[in-house]
Image (cartoon, rainbow, N blue to C red):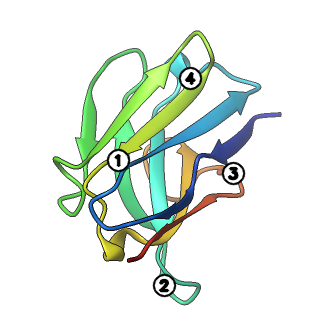
Amino acid sequence: AVQLVESGGGLVHPGGSLRLSCAVSGTQVNDNDMTWVRRQAPEKPLVWIATIRKRSQVTSYADSVKGRFTISRDATNNTVDLQLTNLKTEDTAIYYCVRGLGIGGPRGQGTQVTVSS
């Protein structure tokens, strides 16, 4: 079975940086479109953040994070990472790694990112 385990979240000041990682087992990250999504509050929906296409370096980003977040893939360690820079308070959310292009695919348990002064 495919498993996704996110890590790397934490508390950071506005303007700070974090690097999230999604450890993937049961499949190769190179063979899958992989996506990061987030939920900013329990009552809010999952929101697409970024995708990296399978077997390529093609990436795409939501306008809200473009220029600040970078998605990448580490085939050696079989992870998909998300580098977060210039963080804003509105980036506070639980971040999930998703197998596939959209928000509805299999995902992990998430990692909490809190941006606060």
Residue 43 % position (x, y): 54, 90
- Residue, disc 3: 108
Look at the picture and state if 50 lies above or below 79. below
Crowd band around label 1 with a 10 angstrom C-alpha radius: few (<14), some (14–19), many (20+): many
Cα–Cα gap, marks 3 and 4: 14 Å
Q: Residue 29 carries which label?
A: 4
- N-terminal of the pair, mark 1 or mark 2, is 2
- Secondary structure beneath dot 4 equals helix
Q: What residue type is labelled 3?
A: Gly
Residue at point 74%, 27% (across, down): 25
- N-terminal of the pair, mark 1 or mark 3, is 1
Residue at point 38%, 59% (across, down): 48
Farthest residue to the right: give it: 1
Cα–Cα gap, marks 2 and 3: 18 Å
Q: What residue type is labelled 1?
A: Ala
Residue 99 % position (x, y): 57, 41
Look at the picture and state if 34 lies above or below 77. below
Residue 45 % position (x, y): 48, 78
